[in-house]
Image: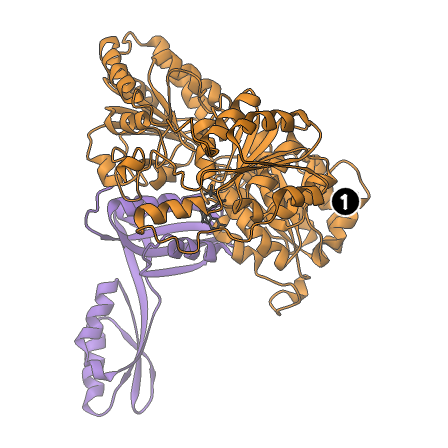
Chain colours: A orange, B purple
Amino acid sequence: MRLSGAEITIQCLQEEGVEFVFGYPGGAVLYIYDALFSQDKVRHILVRHEQAALHAADAYARASGRCGVALVTSGPGVTNAVTGIATAYMDSIPMVIISGQVPTPAIGLDAFQEVDTVGITRPCVKHNFLVKNVDDLAVTIKKAFYVAMSGRPGPVLVDIPKDVSQHMAEFSYPKSVTMRSYNPVTKGHSGQIKKAVQMLLEAKRPMIYAGGGVILGNGSEQLTRLVKRLGYPCTNTLMGLGAYPATDPQFVGMLGMHGTYEANLAMQNCDVLLAIGARFDDRVIGNPEHFCSQERRIVHVDIDPSSISKRVRVDVPIVGNIVDVLDEMQKHLDASEVKPDAVALKDWWKQIDAWRARDCLKYDRNSPIIKPQYVVEKLYEVTHGDAIITSDVGQHQMWAAQYYKFDKPRRWLNSGGLGTMGFGLPAAMGAQMAFPDATVACVTGEASIQMCIQELSTCKQYHLPVKIVNLNNRYLGMVRQWQQILHGNRYSESYMDALPDFVKLAESYGHVGFKIENPADVEPILREAFALKDRVVFMDFITDQTENVFPMVKAGKGLSEMLLGSEDL
Amino acid sequence: MIMENNTSMRHILSLLLENESGALSRVAGLFSARGYNIESLTVAPTEDPTLSRMTIVTSGSQEVIEQITKQVNKLIDVVKVFDLNEGRYIERELMLVKVRAEGSEREELKRTADIFRGRVIDVTDRTYTIELTGPRDKLDAFLEAIDRSQILETVRTGASGIGRGEWILRV
Ligand SMILES: Cc1ncc(C[n+]2csc(CCOP(=O)(O)OP(=O)(O)O)c2C)c(N)n1
């Protein structure tokens, strides 16, 4: 079958079972848009800014476990997309980005809307391709999906010059591809796994630390089974929330810079640590020297060998697919005569419960001003803990992570690695596309929401009834918090002046808006909003301006050096 | 245990990579993005034209070198990576030096070049161009052996390395 490059591109997406392409047209992709027009298998979602196309495709992937797909034009289309590509890259999200490029003869001549896309995106993609010949197009797209989805996932970009999308070629989609230079490991080393299990069974103060890799590797079930069987405490990173059920008593909360007292102290004081799909990053362990000043043995399971022994040297590295490794651990446990040390474990839990008794997430529940934590707690209740929650970046993100208890994976979608303000609303759209019947809410701040506010229009066009929970403190709250704690209360450029009337703004896009100023109205409004199943509702909660996120480990400090409240400042 | 900041050592990494446009910039970009040292980098196609062989001379602690190897391996265009320092190896570099050679200097330079097994490959009334190959320190030693003020221009390729004996790096 002879097809144009543009038709081949769309055929490939169909063959990959792609449901949605999030994108924005332009000169270099006109043939591709023409090919989209004459079919109805792949649905195109027209966003209002390319950054949002990337975030929406990214969140579609996070929520569904499938590959996200975005389509942008050359030049400014690509540069607008870069923030979204980097966001996905930092969180290892599988995506294929198709970008238009100026025609091959014009490349390098500073043509209209030309940028070196492969060069600009190279440091923030898992891989990228420039297709110079239409005969290579189908196999390149096949490779792109394969690379994006296998091993440690990530975004892969395919740059298609306009003439390549116009030229004709014989089309056949390869069933599979092999690449001699790319062979991701899957099965972990059996000897290492056995050693790891022995070490775990010798522990007196064990701890299990699971990150986003468990969610990406669909290993929540295996993780939960292992933790339950051993009776050990478990913590999740910001990216890992939902990997282990938050309402389970063995869950000690999120760890890290804004982790719970009990999670951080258990992490610091354990004698054997099992790290799974996590990478000991600076927001998690704080100062690595402080972390390592405590003797402990570490088992680290990850699909990416370069994540192991990067910041902290580990004793038993296991490179492999999480599901396979955890299944094999279970087999060794079945065969082992040794059982966890019940006496030591009892003492350890006693210690952890004592830390828990500090109730580090307490806040003033009688405040006459709306406390942001209260809004998230009520959001949790009203949605029965069963919503998909997206978030932006700042204090509101941390409160959502701390107070919404995620019992299932792929329910908490946030930009953990890059920390991209503007992620929340387009991410909610992507999640809603993936699950049209799900309750989707975006917990955001008045600053972050304005970074992609134009997407309210996309929500209208595609009937995406996402709920926006705006924790409006009139500040770049997280910036203000750092300025208060680390910069002598000098609030340099962190006040959000000249805010729009969010209710009217929502209404102007055809949505419903509420402004909530009284704590007593929080729950009723949330109920009313979530009852409006087919409408976008923008809830503008006017919250306490001075509230800070606690616990807090200041940058460069150790995990056990937490500030627990304003009395510690 | 924290990553030890033990002493920095010179390492020679040998890579086989797809002979595709952009492959070199992926490797070079990785080194600059992650702040790794590059002392030299050489690359050329192999007997199989779809593959290039690259030699990178770098330095760092054992941990840093381990990270470099892992990160390089992760690049999709890289087929194989080997740290030559893990075995015995041979390293060679080519240097072309243009030197001022007038009067009595000419004999003297010729003699020094001979000692280093260098060859004079171009001559004018006032200059010699000398070709030398060897490991880095031999080339350094030659430059130290002659009068600095005589050196007009030097061109060095950077090291190429290969394992000793029957050990081979191939796909
Ligand atoms: C694109 C981008 N620019 C700047 C920052 C730095 N930053 C982190 S949090 C924050 C403030 C966010 O304010 P808001 O959205 O109102 O949330 P709050 O912290 O008040 O809850 C800023 C500016 C960022 N993360 N992303």
Residue at 67% from the left image edge and 54% from the top image edge: A73
Residue in front for this viewpoint, A294 or A12: A294
Image spot of residue B94 (x, y percent): 32, 67
Q: Quadrant of the C terminus of chain A?
A: top left
Residue at 23% from the left image edge and 35% from the top image edge: A292
Image spot of residue A281 (x, y percent): 35, 39
Numbered circles on residues, count: 1
**Can see residue B54?**
yes
**Can see residue A138?**
no
Residue lying farthest to the right in this orientation: A38
- Residue B50 vertical position relative to residue A182 in the rendered view, above or below: below
Residue at 42% from the left image edge and 16% from the top image edge: A248
Decide if residue A7 is on the left or right side of residue A144: right
- Residue A227 vertical position relative to residue B79 in the rendered view, above or below: above
Residue placed under numbered mark 1 in the picture: A36
Q: Hey, what amino acid is under mark 1? A: Leu
Decide if residue A293 is on the left or right side of residue A194: left
- Residue B115 vertical position relative to residue A430 in the rendered view, above or below: below
Residue in front for this viewpoint, A262 or A86: A262
Secondary structure of residue under mark 1: helix
* Badge 1: chain ID: A
Residue at 29% from the left image edge and 23% from the top image edge: A358
- Residue A124 vertical position relative to residue A513 in the rendered view, above or below: below
Image spot of residue A243 (x, y percent): 46, 24
Crowding at dot 1, Cα within 10 Å, few <14 / some 14-19 / many 20+, comes out as many
Q: Quadrant of residue A363?
A: top left
Residue in front for this viewpoint, B70 or B169: B70
Q: Quadrant of the N terminus of chain A?
A: top right
